[in-house]
Image (cartoon, rainbow, N blue to C red):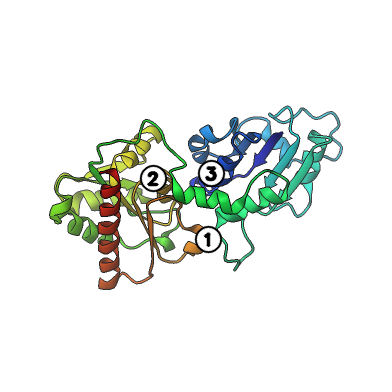
Amino acid sequence: MKVLIIRPGALGDTLLMLPALAALKGKATVDFAGRQPGLGYIGDAVCRAMDLETAGWHRLFADPSGVPGRPPLPVSRADRIVAFFKDEGGIIRGNLKAFFPGASVWVLPAFPPKGKQIHVARYLARRLQLAGLPVNSDGALREAGRRPLLSGPWVSKKRDRMVFHPGSGAPKKNHSPEFWMNLLQRHGEMPRFARLRPTLLLGPAEAPLQDFFRNHTLVPRLEILFCPEKEQLLNVLGSAAFYLGHDSGVTQLSGLMGTPTVALFKQTDPVQWGPLGPYVRIIHRQKADPKLFELIMAAVNAMFTVFSDKRG
């Protein structure tokens, strides 16, 4: 079966397709169209990963009226198509039917209905199952919690970093820079983490914080990485003894790689957006009070111990 799945989105949105894509591997030939940077991390799970921002895909969204003989999309054939879009006017569905006559076409919402208590990855797997693809949504989520869905040469046997990511794509998700400075200081002072190199990941949204952390940190050997490229990011996460971050795409990536991951949820719902992986702890608490620090330190210690024991 030749399948085309289309789902634009940010890094975390694309990564949450991985449980379903992993379940399809070997059962169907899957082409996936989405957006960077997420596409760069799912290539091994699909036959072809295509960027919707490249030439040709604009035709999917164009009003077809009065445009006979249109050039095709960048995909030559598909037996079954599942597109995750809000398509109230039916233009996308109509174009897909025209471009792929005879194919089964499903255009579905990209996210669960508001208030629906279901993980987004489970929702996506169920939608693909509804469209007739050989996916067991419960099995796909179980597998994502059992083993790393992203593995490769970047996963190091020498876990010599502790990685902190104080940002996300939305300020409302984030605790303050001062909160993170305190976390860095506390972890840096713990004897059991003395051998670990503290590493701070900053993305585009955290550009203004570079000077703050450089000028105010008291943490020895702190490495600050701003917008690392894909390979560097994978190597950093793959060499982490533990990772601590907000609800973000990088946190999703860390969990899926099998890195011990502690995820801080402040405003968003972890039932829907919690990171997946075999070594994940989620802390859902809005207030940055002493109790939150206690919960974080306990979770990091527990994850570090469990992972260290498992690795022998």
Q: Who's the residue at 25% across and 72% down the image? A: 290
Secondary element type, mark 2? loop
Residue 272, label in figure: 1
Mark 1, Cα crowd under 10 Å, few <14 / some 14-19 / many 20+, is some
Mark 2, Cα crowd under 10 Å, few <14 / some 14-19 / many 20+, is many
Residue 255 makes an appearance in the image = yes
Point out residue 141 in the picture as x, y percentages from the top left corner. Answer: 53, 52
Q: Who's the residue at 18% across and 57% down the image? A: 185
Q: What residue type is labelled 3?
A: Leu
Q: Mark 3 points at which residue?
A: 18
Up the image or down, 195 lies above or below 58; here it is below
Give the spatial CA distance, label 3 vs label 2: 14 Å
Residue 163 makes an appearance in the image = no
Secondary element type, mark 3? helix
Q: Which amino acid does label 1 sit on?
A: Gln
Point out residue 256 in the picture as x, y percentages from the top left corner. Answer: 44, 46
Point out residue 38 in the picture as x, y percentages from the top left corner. Answer: 50, 41
Question: Which badge, 1 or 3, comes first in the chain's sequence?
Answer: 3
Q: In the rendered view of the protein, which quadrant contains the N terminus?
A: top right
Residue 258, label in figure: 2
